[in-house]
Amino acid sequence: MDIPTYETISIELDDRILVATLNRPHALNALNTQMGLDLYDLWSRLADCGDDVRVAILTGTGDRAFCAGGDFKERNGLSDDAWRHQHEIFERAFQAIMDSPVPVIAAANGHAYGGGLEFILAADFAYGVPSARFALTEVTIGIMPGGGGTQTLPRAVGGRRAKELILTGRAFSADQALDWGVLNLICEPEALLQTAKDTARTIARNAPLSVRQAKKAIQDGLQTDLHAGLSIEIEAYNHLVPTEDRREGIRAFVEKRRPIFKGR
């Protein structure tokens, strides 16, 4: 897979696992226009990467912040039209992460505020360090979550708690994030990325088409009722029946060996 060098993100690709690291440590990895463009480009490429990437990990540089949210030093003084234009870039970046056929694990190496928390919520699941704090603080500065937070946070923590967190702008701890379903696991800082990579390797060993179809069925099914969700599941299931990987998986099971999946 051909991945360019990005100004605001560092990329590591090893054994079909991609690690994307938000890399603006001087600004606590805050989201600026260039980062929005870089993220949109990266996730658009992953949507058409074939079997080159099976799992992606999103993390941040440093030990203070995963992402401090929008870069308001850059946004200060923008005209209304310029603000909306910039935000359209951010919208596309968040949507591209949520729509990614490749599973995305967020590894919160530090605080995640505003858009930073929305990145975590846009991922399929997330790990974080004990010291991390999380918040959607937009209402405290005259705006509101615009990277999916009013939709993704309620789906993670429930509507009533999401309303409390969004309408107050209060921060919450890693322990609370774990209890409420924002994080799946808390790891010590030195173990965070390795733990995410271990999980990524486990996923990457599985049939990539199966992983993608299962993710799609979960994602699409959550937007509808149970009956429609079951139909989505069967449609996704039937896409796998004629694949080489399905035949290889059954043969390997019968022959008591590890399957070799090729993503076709």
Image (tube, rainbow, N blue to C red):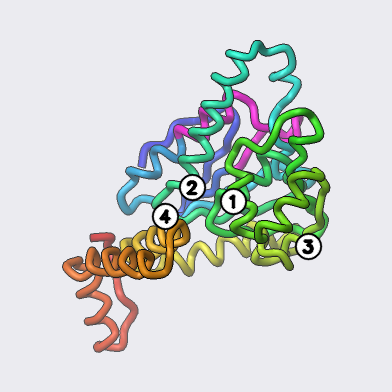
Amino acid carrying mark 4 in the image: Arg
Numbered circles on residues, count: 4
Residue drawn 38% across the image and 62% down it: 217
Whether residue 137 can be seen here: yes
Q: Are marks 3 and 4 in contact (CB under 8 Å)?
A: no
| Numbered range of the magenta stretch | 21-41
Q: From mark 3 to mark 4, how far is it between C-alphas? A: 33 Å
Disc assigned to residue 152: 1
Q: Is residue 143 above or below residue 61?
A: above
Q: Amino acid at mark 3?
A: Gln
The reply to whether the C-beta atoms of the residues labelled 2 and 1 are less than 8 Å apart is yes
Image height check: is 211 above or below 36?
below
Compare residues 186 and 181 and report the one nearer the observer: 181
Q: CA distance from mark 2 to mark 1?
A: 10 Å
Dot 2 or dot 4, earlier in sequence: 4
Residue 15 seen: no
In the image, residue 12 above or below residue 186: above
Question: Left of 42 or right of it: where is 198?
Answer: right
Question: Which secondary structure lies at badge 2?
Answer: helix
The Cα–Cα distance between marks 2 and 4, rounded to whole angstroms, is 20 Å
Label 1 crowd bin: few (<14), some (14–19), many (20+), radius 10 Å: some
Q: Residue furthest left?
A: 242
Q: CA distance from mark 2 to mark 3?
A: 23 Å
Residue 257 magenta-drawn?
no
Answer whether residue 24 is magenta in the image.
Answer: yes
Q: Quadrant of the N terminus?
A: top left
Residue corresponding to mark 4 = 16
User: What residue is at 74 percent from the left and 35 percent from the top?
Assistant: 138
